[in-house]
Amino acid sequence: MIQCPTDDTYLASPEFLSFALHTLTCISLPLHVLGFYCILEKTPKTMGSVKLLLLNIHTCGFFLDILITILGVPYGIFPAMAGYGLGFVDLPGLCLYLIVMTINAISVGIFLIFENRFFILFAENSWWRHFRKPVFVASYAVSVIYFLPAQFLIPEQEGARKFVWESLGCQPVLPTHRNLFVLSLDYSVIARSIFIACGMVQIEMNVFFWLNVYYLMIAKPSTKISQRTQQLQKKLVKALFVQGIATIDLFAIPIATVVYIMNVWYHNQAINNLVFVGLAFHGTASSLIMIFIHKPYRDFVLSPFVRLKVPNVLVGTKRSPDLGFVGPTVIEAS
């Protein structure tokens, strides 16, 4: 029997989830468009090697936003591996697979950024150059296939729905226009799949994160790279690290919440709704972080406000009636 409070609050309702996710869509879409413009038009040559990588992460983030807030709108009833799809596409199994795959693809994209900085700065002529592309292919292949076992083992839905409702001590407010989708009654297959995929990409990210930290912050600087170039690269790497780590944290908090709920076997529909609101907030937050953490994008976005604050200055001349000379005069023009 699952422990749960009475789920009759607005936060626990399907209406709240739909409203919150659609509202986030209205906020995030303009930010995504601005992010695309900044990457495509305002990326300087010094960031040229990471331009496509930033575009890759931003595109995946945009796709994830669309999946969660428009197409899928997942109304999960954790700790049961079941829920409803309230979006425009009534295919909750497919939408869930695409959401999970895209989250992992974003994580792989962050690993590629960390690897790119290490390779460009320190390892272009090393043995690693022979293995990096196969590792990239394998990482993305895992993103595509690791959740497939769960898709092939989806139980017969009528019996699975009956089992889920019997296991719930109380029922949340239920949508009347959609059927409950049960992903699995056996959590071990899903847990193993997620553990393997997440473990792989976490190892990759950590290895190249610390390699960059060592060579940039601890090891003796290379004499082949000028001091100015080293400083510019350090600033870029720091910005990319902040962006990458912040993106991972935006995923980690909702996912850790789900893991905890399932471990203690506790149902609270308001928390379940907030989990997906948190995942959907990733698009808004990651776009803002990318725009304001990288100086070229930040300068572009803030340039209209800077121009408003700096007055136009005109230099004129003025004759002194007492001394009889002409001197410069500064005149502020509004």
Image (cartoon, grey):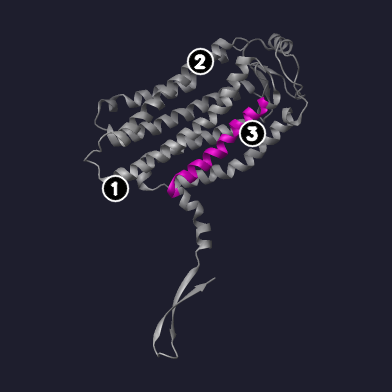
Give the extent of the magenta segment. Answer: 271-296
The part of the image, by quadrant, that contains residue 254 is top right
Tell me residue 291's x, y (percent).
49, 45
Q: Along the polypeptide, which appears first: circle 1 or circle 2?
A: 2
In the image, is 47 to the left or to the right of 176? Answer: left
Tell me residue 139's x, y (percent).
42, 23
- Please give the residue where the numbered disc 2 appears in the rendered image: 193
Q: Along the polypeptide, which appears first: circle 3 or circle 2?
A: 3
Instruction: Residue 284: say if magenta.
Output: yes
The C terminus lies in which quarter of the figure?
A: bottom right
Mark 1 belongs to which amino acid? Arg
Camera-side residue: 264 or 128? 264
Work out how far the residue at label 1 is from the one at label 2, CA to CA, in angstroms: 45 Å
The image's mark for residue 70 is 3
SS under mark 2:
helix
Tell me residue 165's x, y (percent).
73, 13
Q: Residue at x 72, y 32 (%)?
A: 16
Tell me residue 260's x, y (percent).
59, 19
Mark 3 belongs to which amino acid? Ile
Q: Tell us which disc is closer to us: 3 or 2.
A: 2
SS assignment for the magenta stretch, majority: helix
The N terminus lies in which quarter of the figure?
A: top right
Q: Residue at x 58, y 45 (%)?
A: 30
- Please give the residue where the numbered disc 1 appears in the rendered image: 228
